[in-house]
Image (tube, rainbow, N blue to C red):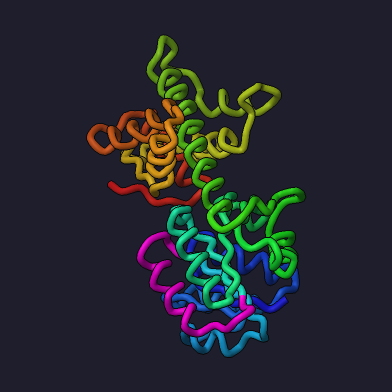
Amino acid sequence: MRIGFIGLGRMGKNMVLRLLSKKHSVVAWNRSIEPLQEVESHGAIGATDFKNLVSQLPSPRIIWTMLPAGDVTEKTLAELLELLSKGDIVIDGANSNYVDTVRRGEQFRERGIHFFDAGVSGGIVGAQIGYCIMIGGPQAAFKTIEPLFSDLTQPEGYRYLGPSGAGHFVKMVHNGIEYAMMQGMAEGFNLLKNGPYPHLDLNATATLWQHGSIIQSFLLEQTQKGLEKDPGLSSFSGHVEDSGEGQWTIETALKYKIPVETIAAALFSRYHSRKRGEFGHKTLSLQRSQFGGHPEKK
């Protein structure tokens, strides 16, 4: 398949490289030139602007945007809306608020353009092992783009979940759960570090837990790899950022009067970390760096 791809950040660039490895043809655009040159060296076709990108795609055109949620995605989709034609397909892979996605889905539907939301999980390692993708949008057009999802993901790693917004809603809740799981692990390692046995080898403990324990997981594996490189987490200040999904999860829970106490506590702990970063907060920063490549604000 030939696909247009906009946004070659931490996730986008690796997704393009995986698509190329699966023999898809990719026309790519990115604001900075270095990632574009890298994917071009692997066979992608570079575009000078959105109009040039659209002109290089056969009808019905398929364009995947992988940009930061918010204004950047909003402006990009508005520009594409004016460039595309009836029957074309747009996939938003950002961590967009599902409420915005529902609105955008209606805007594109009015023009006869199929709009999909794709919540992508897998971080910077997804290019090698495959991603998990949660998909919303018009079901009638899903089969057209299904081969892309199949080649980007692990076996059973993608699922059509419902109309516009469903994919981003499920990804939002996924990330809220992620906050809570990370927080529980961070608190545990903080207790190991500062409890009655302060000389415990935390890397060895994490490695042990990866062999048959109930908490064995991808997240624990990434924590262990980080502790192996930096046992004292001296390269982290403990300032833990959040990208919005935890807050949206809590706001949605409040709207529907559904309790999410653990997720709320995890988000508040991140707020607390910006005043006083402790070892547990450094563990959270380590985890975000390991699986997502997220830089820590000092």
Q: Residue at x 55, y 51 (%)?
A: 123
The residue segment tinted magenta is 67-88
Which residue is drawn at the image coordinates 47% and 52% (left, top)? 293
**Drawn side of residue 47 relative to residue 156, left or right:** left
Q: Position of residue 268 (x, y in %)?
A: 33, 32
Q: Is 78 a magenta residue?
A: yes
Q: Where is residue 82 in the image (x, y as percent from the top left)?
A: 47, 83
Q: Examine the structure image and report whether residue 159 is included in the region drawn in magenta.
A: no
Residue in view at x 53 percent, y 29 percent: 203
Left or right for 236, reference 227: left
Q: Which of 88 and 176 is in front in this view?
A: 88
> Residue 142 placed where, x, y %?
70, 64
Of residues 113 and 132, which is closer to you in this image?
113
Q: Which residue is drawn at 54% across and 82% down?
A: 84
Is residue 298 visible to us here? yes
Q: Looking at the rendering, which quadrant does residue 59 occupy?
A: bottom right
Image quarter where the N terminus lies is: bottom right
Image spot of residue 251 (x, y percent): 38, 40
**Residue found at the very far left of the displayed protein:** 275
